[in-house]
Amino acid sequence: MRLDHYRACSWREKRQVLDVFWRRSRTAPPAMVAAAYEYGWWAVASLTVIAAELALVVAVLAMRSSSWGWWVGAAEAANALALLRAMRRLRDVEVAAVARPDEVARPGVG
């Protein structure tokens, strides 16, 4: 997934896109919804990679019977919750983007 809409945004608009994605903004312009949808896939992918890395660290620390394993396990749990929330928000943003596909502005057009 390319980030055409997201990259076309200014810094202030990017902050609004993050707000649209992570908070439930129902009155977002179609271009912001499209950018949030693009951003969402990257957020889910990044959180998935972090979860895999933390799982590996937890496994190594558990084999060594390290007390740090509990702290990393807590970080893994927090990351898993963030990943679930990102997946839910991506689904919500996707529904919003599909609901009005003709209104979404294309970057570089118009």
Image (cartoon, rainbow, N blue to C red):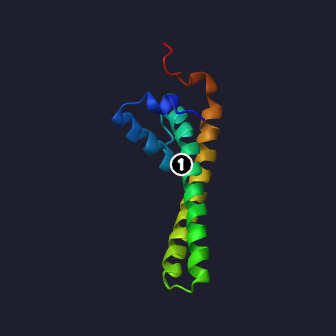
Residue at image x 48%, y 17%? 108
Q: Indicate the secondary structure of the residue bearing disc 1.
A: helix
Percent of width and height locating residue 101: 62, 26
Look at the image and tell me whether residue 61 can be seen. yes
Q: Position of residue 6 (x, y in %)?
A: 47, 33
How many labels were placed on the picture?
Answer: 1
- Residue 52, x across and y down, in percent: 61, 62
- Report which quarter residue 17 is drawn in: top left
Q: Mark 1 highlights which residue?
A: 43
- Residue drawn 65% across the image and 33% down it: 98
Name the residue nearer the viewer: 51 or 100: 51
* Vertical arrangement, residue 16 with respect to residue 66, above or below: above
Residue positioned 64% across, 39% down in the render: 95
Q: Nearer the viewer, residue 77 or 31?
A: 77
Q: Quadrant of the N terminus?
A: top right
Residue 41 on image: x %, y %: 59, 43
> Of 101 and 40, which appears nearest the observer?
40
When asked about the image quadrant of residue 97, the answer is: top right
Image: 79 above or below 19: below
**Is the residue marked by circle 1 packed among few (<14), some (14-19), or many (20+) residues within 10 Å?**
some
